[in-house]
Each structure stands twice: as structure tokens, then as C-alpha cells.
Image (tube, rainbow, N blue to C red):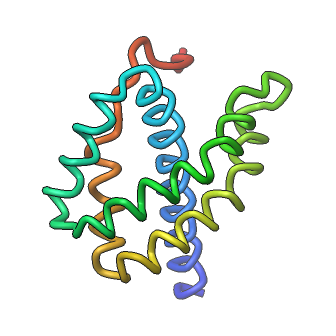
Amino acid sequence: MILVIKKLITMKKLVTCLAVFIAVFSFSSLYAQRDPARAAEMKQKMKTDLKLTDAQSDSISNIQQEFMPKRREIYMDQTLSQDEKKAKMQPINDQANKRIQAVLGDDLFKKYQDWIEKNRPQRMGGGGGSH
């Protein structure tokens, strides 16, 4: 029973991490389109912080760019609720993450996920409050 609970907690953490990953790259990518210099700066920061090779850094960028149109389409779909958007983005992000993990390996992929969480753009104004 305890093992099942631990697995559920691990799955919740994974889902949360993936949701953050979705948000980071949705917002980062939209932001990058408006400010290519900022996107290049963040790519260089990631490369330096994680000690990535040129090939690894370029591969991550290429993978994210490949999946961005699908993510953007879902993100911009005003007919979907946030939960529906997350559900539709899940398989897209799973595919992207598998490919990034294949490029980086398990240990560096974990560092990459931590780096994404730490460096995600801060959203101004926030969402709905809890009243």
C-alpha cells in the first residue's frame, strides 16, 4: 500500500513537472518570437549552466521548435479549458521529453528539468486568486 502511494506521489510530481515544462516552453517560445535576442541569451545561459555541448544545445532547440506549432495551437485554443489543454499537451510533451532525454541522458535530463523550473519566465499579474 505504501509503495502504491509513493508511486502516485511520484506520478503527481512528474505531471506537475510536465505542466511546468509546458508552460515554460509555451511562454518562452512566444516570448522568444517577440525577442529573439532574449531567446539566444536564454539558450546560451542554459548551455553554460548545464555545460551542454553545441550539439546538445542545438538539439534541444530543434526539438522544442519542432513541437512548438502543436503546443501553440493548443495553448491558443480558447474553446479548451486549462485541464483540457494540459491533457492535449501531455502526449506532445512526452514525445519532446523522450527525445530530449535521449540527447542528454538521464542525469543531465534531470538537471535540465531542474534548470527549466528555476529559470522559467515569471508571469506578471498571475492567474485567478484563491478567495
Q: Dividing the image into 4 quarters, which one contains the N terminus?
A: bottom right
Residue with the most extreme right position: 79
Q: Residue at x 42, y 60 (%)?
A: 60
Q: Dividing the image into 4 quarters, which one contains the C terminus?
A: top right
The residue lying toward the viewer, choosing from 52 and 26, is 52
Q: Which residue is drawn at 41% across and 30% down?
A: 32
Residue 4 position, x and y percent, is 60, 83
Residue 84 position, x and y percent, is 78, 41
Q: How many marks?
A: 0
Q: Is residue 89 above or below residue 57?
A: above
Q: Which residue is drawn at 81% across and 31% down?
A: 80
Left or right: residue 84 versus residue 31 is: right
Q: Is residue 19 above or below residue 60?
A: above
Q: Which residue is drawn at 25% across and 65% down?
A: 54
The residue lying toward the viewer, choosing from 27 and 36, is 36
Q: Is residue 115 above or below residue 23?
A: below
Residue 94: quarter of image: bottom right
The residue lying toward the viewer, choosing from 62 and 3, is 62
Left or right: residue 111 versus residue 129 is: left
Residue 72 position, x and y percent, is 66, 35
Residue 103 position, x and y percent, is 41, 76
Left or right: residue 46 versus residue 120 is: left
